[in-house]
Image (cartoon, rainbow, N blue to C red):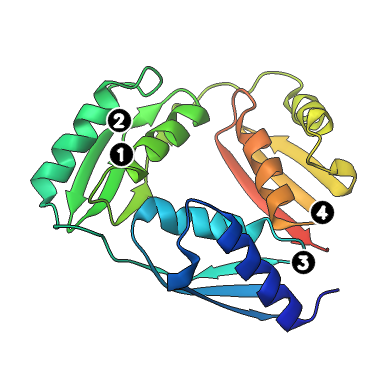
């Protein structure tokens, strides 16, 4: 088990190692496995990259994101940001036209209905990188479908195929399209992988993650 100082240093090193992050503008504190990020990022994408970098450090059990987005360059008005988002979504081969975006003071609300979780994720991924975006709330929902037989087994099989996930401590239950993940994992990175794999199963409408991080 790392001391608070060792964990803080490890997170700082990982932020410095991540080329998409300017670690000089980010403060890090650590206590009993919980890490807090403060300071600012020059884009919403960089803010998310910093959080992901902290989450993959061994020994981190939780990350409190208190980073503020300070956009570099001249600010863009909401109309320009909205048009840029609409153009970006239009050119996507995976995001359907049922997804819409509203922009208020740089913050984007994504709404609409899609067939698959990856389409919702792709929409978020496209929008987060648009210049002028301060943050994104993803309100896109999945169309209700009947859950196919054997979803639990399919999710467990996906866990077993992933070399970055030790799934021995995870239990999976599925009912009416709702997946519950319970148990223990070794890192937040593993927990994120497990949740992503569960969302990839056909017929899944929601995923509840009750995973304890035990380094």
- Indicate the secondary structure of the residue bearing disc 1: strand
Crowd band around label 4 with a 10 angstrom C-alpha radius: few (<14), some (14–19), many (20+): some
Q: Is residue 67 left or right of residue 42?
A: right
State how far apart marks 3 and 4 are (Cα): 17 Å
State how far apart marks 3 and 1 are (Cα): 36 Å
Give the residue number, with chain letter if any, for mark 1: 111
| Residue 124 rendering spot, x and y as whole percentages | 39, 40
Give the residue number, with chain letter if any, for mark 3: 59
Comparing labels 3 and 4, the label whose residue is closer to the camera: 3
State how far apart marks 4 and 1 are (Cα): 32 Å
Crowd band around label 2 with a 10 angstrom C-alpha radius: few (<14), some (14–19), many (20+): many
Give the residue number, with chain letter if any, for mark 2: 99
Against 211, is 138 above or below? above
For residue 40, what is the image quadrant?
bottom left
Which residue is at a point 61% across and 43% down the rendered structure image? 207
Q: Is residue 155 left or right of residue 64?
A: right
Against 14, is 77 above or below? above
Q: Are marks 1 and 2 in contact (CB under 8 Å)?
A: yes
Q: Report the quarter where the N terminus lies.
A: bottom right
| Residue 110 rendering spot, x and y as whole percentages | 31, 42
């Amino acid at each position: 088990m790392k001391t608070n100082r060792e964990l803080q240093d490890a997170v700082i090193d990982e932020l410095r190692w991540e080329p998409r992050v300017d670690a000089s503008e980010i403060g890090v504190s650590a206590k009993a496995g919980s890490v807090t990020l403060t300071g600012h990022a020059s884009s919403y994408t960089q803010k998310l990259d910093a959080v992901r970098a902290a989450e993959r450090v061994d020994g981190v059990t939780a990350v409190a994101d208190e980073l503020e987005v300070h956009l570099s360059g001249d600010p863009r008005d909401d109309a320009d940001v909205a048009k840029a988002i609409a153009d970006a979504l239009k050119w996507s081969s995976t995001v359907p036209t049922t997804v819409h975006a509203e922009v208020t003071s740089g913050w984007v609300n994504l709404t609409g209905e899609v067939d698959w979780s990856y389409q919702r994720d792709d929409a978020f991924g496209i929008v987060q990188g648009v210049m002028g975006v301060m943050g994104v709330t993803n309100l896109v929902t999945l169309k209700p479908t009947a859950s196919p037989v054997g979803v639990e087994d399919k999710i467990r099989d996906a866990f077993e195929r992933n070399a970055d996930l030790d799934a021995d401590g995870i239990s999976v239950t599925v009912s009416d399209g709702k997946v519950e993940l319970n148990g223990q994992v070794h890192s937040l990175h593993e927990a994120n992988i497990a949740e992503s794999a569960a969302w990839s199963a056909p017929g899944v409408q929601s995923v509840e993650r009750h995973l304890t991080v035990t380094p």
